[in-house]
Amino acid sequence: MKNQSKFYQNALQYGAILGLTLIFYFMVLNALGATQSKIAGLANYVFVVVALYMGNKVLRDQIQGGYLSYARALGSGTLISTVSGVLQSVFMLVFYKFISPESLVQIMNIVEEEMVLSGKTDQEIELAMKMSGYFMNPAVMSVMTLLGTVLMGFIFSLIVAAIVKKDEPMFSN
C-alpha cells in the first residue's frame, strides 16, 4: 500500500511540474505573440515526453525497486498527463474568460485570414467560422484542453512505457 501512495504522489508531482511548465511556456509564447507558431508548439511535445520519461524513471528506480511493468508505466504516464491536463484546463478557462478574452477574437481573425489565403470561398469561410465559433469559448476550450492533453499523454505514454519498463526476473527470490 505504501508503494501505491508513492505511485500517486509521483504522478501528482510530475503532473504538476508538467502542467506548470506548459502554462509558463504558454505565457511566454503569448507574451511574444507566438502562440500560433507550429514550431513553438512542437516544444510542448518535448516537455510532455521528458516529464513522462522522468516521472516513470523515478517511479521505476526509486519507488518500485528498479522494476516497472509496461502497464504500470502506462498508467503512471496517463495519470501524469491527466494531472497536467487538469491544471492546464483550469488555467485556460481563467485565461480566456478573465485575463485575456480578446485573445479568442485574435485567434478567430488568424483562422479567417489563413482560410482567405488558402483560397476558400466566402461561403466556406462563413461556415467554418460559424463552426469555429462554437468551439472558441473558454468552457469548451478548457474541456478540449483536458481531453487533448490526456489523449496526447496516453499516446506518448505508450511509447515511453516501452522504453522505461523493466520487468522483474521470472524466478527472482
Image (cartoon, rainbow, N blue to C red):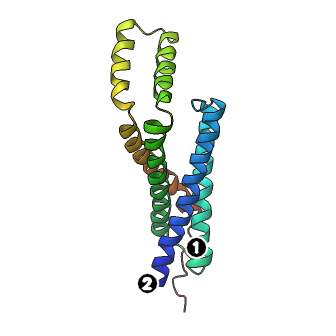
Q: Residue furthest front?
A: 98
Residue pictured at 45% horizontal, 38% vertical = 98
Residue pictured at 39% horizontal, 13% vertical = 125
Q: Secondary structure at mark 1?
A: helix
Give 87 or 112, whichever is nearer the viewer.
87
Q: Position of residue 140 (x, y in %)?
A: 36, 38
Give 11 or 31, whichever is nearer the viewer.
31
Image side of residue 42 versus residue 80, left or right: right
Q: How many marks?
A: 2
User: Which residue lies under the disc numbered 2?
Assistant: 1
Q: Position of residue 169 (x, y in %)?
A: 55, 81
Q: Secondary structure at mark 2?
A: loop
Q: Earlier in the sequence, mark 1 or mark 2?
A: 2
Give 167 or 141, whichever is nearer the viewer.
141
Q: Position of residue 138 (x, y in %)?
A: 40, 37
Q: Is residue 152 above or below residue 167?
A: above
Task: Quote the CA–CA distance across marks 1 and 2.
Answer: 16 Å
What is the quadrant of the N terminus in the image?
A: bottom left
Q: Residue furthest bottom?
A: 173
What is the quadrant of the C terminus in the image?
A: bottom right
Residue pictured at 66% horizontal, 32% vertical = 32
Q: Is residue 78 above or below residue 140?
A: below
Mark 1: few/some/many CA within 10 Å (<14, 14-19, 20+): many
Three-letter residue code for mark 2: Met
User: Which residue lies under the disc numbered 1?
Assistant: 60
- Residue 143 falls in which quadrant of the image? top left
Q: Position of residue 47 (x, y in %)?
A: 61, 50
Residue 77 tag number: none
Q: Is residue 123 above or below residue 136?
A: above
Three-letter residue code for mark 1: Arg
